[in-house]
Image (cartoon, rainbow, N blue to C red):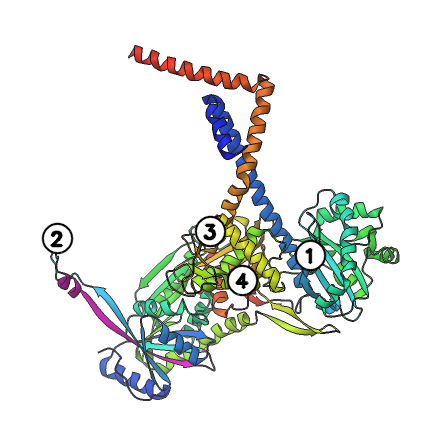
Amino acid sequence: MSSEDFSKFREKLAKDHRTVLDSLLQKHSTECKKSFLNEIQRDQVHSMIVNMCAFAFSESGPLTSTGYHFITVDPLYKYRGEKEGNKIFDIVIYNRESKRAIMIECKSSIGDARKSVLAPLADQIRNVRDHKKELEDEIGGEITDFEYVICGLSQDIEEVGKALQDSNEPVCLWTVDLFRFTLKLFNLAGSADGSQTGNLIRKGQLHKDESLRKSLFEKTESRGQIEGFKIAPTSHICRVLSRVFERIIQEVINANAGQEKRFWLHELVQMTQKELPRLQAEDVQRITRELYELALQLKIVEAEKSLDKENEMAFVLKIGARSPRTLEKEINERYAEEKCRDRSRALALKEFEESLKSNTGSLDYYLSSAAGEQESSGATKHDDTKRK
Amino acid sequence: MPLQGLTGKLTFESFLDSVKLHHRNTNEEIRILAYVSNLTPERLFDSMKRFQTFNVTELGEIVEVRVERLSSSDSGSALGEKSNDSETALAKISSTTSTYYCHFNRRRGLLLCFTTDTLEEAGRTMDRFVNHTNGIFPLWIHPITFDKIRREIQNTNPDSIISEFHAHRYKTDGEDVIRPNYEERYFKYMADDGRFTLDELSRAYGVLPTSILFNILNVCKFRITNMGRFAFAHGNLDFLFNIINEVLAKALETKALIEKAKIEFIPVNMGKKEVRLPKVIPIDIVFSREIDFSEVERLVDNMSGEDFNFEIFDMLLMPGSIHLSGTIVDRNKNIGFNITGNSEKITLSPRKDTNFDSMMQFYKMITERLDLKAEIRASTIT
């Protein structure tokens, strides 16, 4: 139902029922916005897990001694495919001695371990094998062997571990503790004592590299944050927008010290590049376009016709405060409002109709009762006047 | 007559001789503002030249900074008197010129600015510049370290008199003091028994000095603060310089620790080709006690103050034993860095353009607002 139809429908209702519909709309709108904020938080947790894995293997990270190097995030971003929900691994780490690449999938939450983690794994692995050459180009070295990892919160990984016990998916499990900032290899089938090592290695459920196994069975603290990898191209668009616009405010608008809140498209491209440094130029251009289109839609910016640079777009920030936190809040609220408007109307209407059916069995009854109410309210007014 | 009007090419030594001579002739108090900086002299003086209200002249090793200050004066107008005359209105706004003579010792990263302006006015004028320039920070030392220096001065000079001090209480835990819940205490005390009173107040109310006026008979009368502001009233100027050196040594220790933090992309040969991979060295602010979730909540909601203006965004804050992560923006300096933290420590990971001063300011804020005894440490990961 369009916004106009909804308003018309609402107007036709009796006052009491309008109140009911309004409160249902309010309820669904609040729930929807809350679920959107949870979505953002899940994305932040996901990025945090990605960063903990990345930092641990970065050039000064605590696990560099294992010989593995963190290479990049979303390594097969270009080959993610168009299919909705098509998953690519989040990180690749590489050991140039053993020529082994480890593909890591990070999970902020896991519902059904078998359905949401193990079942899609075969497709993900096929995608990696199909694009081995492109991965080698990205890494800068030959790959002779792959290993795969699912990394998530302890309670979730325990569930995956249970599901994996009677399966043969070639995947190792890592856990993170977000409160202690630690990373650890999950002790699958009591593998830490060595009794199952050979068996699990053969199944691809434990790392072949002994030094990596040993280091990861110890808890490793990983707290550092790597600029440029705080978000990935697959991160939530609101977070990407907030982070890129934070740089626009700090590095362009405030740095120019003027009163104008104007910036150019090429500056937006530069800031996107800073937040997503490993991305190819064409992807940066595309993501930048998505960002300003969203910013225009949310009325965060206004486009301006450039007088002196005909071929380039200029934008003016429409948010009063030059504060990244205020900007982030505005982006999230306006995005939630935009996304939730239709959904909450539809849900409110559905629930309203269901409640009518269960109470009276007919919507017509309510509409006619509304008409009756209007008449009787007119009569009441008349009576009141008489009394006066 | 204020300290001004110097000309020619000066060395730092010849300038100090002029200062001493000026002081002998006028008995005027000399105020010194000290800053640490990792800028090159060229960049530092270029920033000064470009700063809106500064008028800069180079005099050899010294740079003269003249600042026009406008102040309104109502002294001539009777209460309720109206004036429509714009000239009269303008006449009420008087302009004064403040002069600062600055010397930058690149090797030690120390900028000293001499003036006869009051410390408050000089601080306000120079702080406007320092608070908005990357790579420079007041010669701040931790209040506990400052108190140690105070005690050392007292111990080596038993006859010293503290005739004035300012003392603040900072957030600590488990202190045995009067009404410990009152965390924001401030005392200003003026009397010659200051050294005794300071100890008494410290014990009873848990305060630490931030500014002290010392009078060491027949040696020197001077004021020291933990924010790099000093004043020389009379006596031996070199005595004060020795103390400034001691403060500098402490400030440089903190600066050196903070400067270990960096991010760079280094080339690594992967067999077929070299790829540039990130190398991040974070630093830790380690708490002296377990921090509560509510304390962190309060901190992140209020991170601006007289001399700092931080904000956090893309923040994830979870209760329990606390997970905090996000990006901190220093809104004064337009600089950002990333943090992760829990109830034990906060780790600061720099971005490419993060300078030491924003992280030092953040550490100062943590000691003032969250845990006075928090220590800055190089990250244990190397």
SS class, disc 1: loop
What numbered label is drawn on residue B80? 2
List x then y, in percent, for residue B48: 37, 75
- Name the kind of residue labelled 1 in the image: Asp
Indicate whether A250 appears above or below A41: below
Distance from Cα at disc 1 to Cα at disc 2: 72 Å
Q: CA distance from mark 3 to mark 4?
A: 17 Å
Real-space Cα separation, disc 1 to disc 3, in angstroms: 30 Å
The residue where tag 4 is placed is A269
Q: Does the CB distance between marks 4 and 1 fall below 8 Å?
A: no
Q: Secondary structure at mark 4?
A: helix
Q: Is residue A182 left or right of residue A382?
A: right
- Tag on residue A300? 3
Query: Is A19 situated above or below B199?
Result: above
Residue A90 is tagged as 1
Chain of the residue displaying label 2:
B
Secondary structure, mark 2, is loop
Q: Amino acid at mark 2?
A: Gly
Q: Counting residues from the N terminus, which is met first, the one under dot 4 or under dot 1?
A: 1
| Nearest to the observer: residue B4 or residue B155 | B4
**Mark 2 to mark 3 CA distance (whole Å):** 48 Å
Q: Are marks 2 and 4 in contact (CB under 8 Å)?
A: no
> Start and end of the magenta stretch?
B86-109
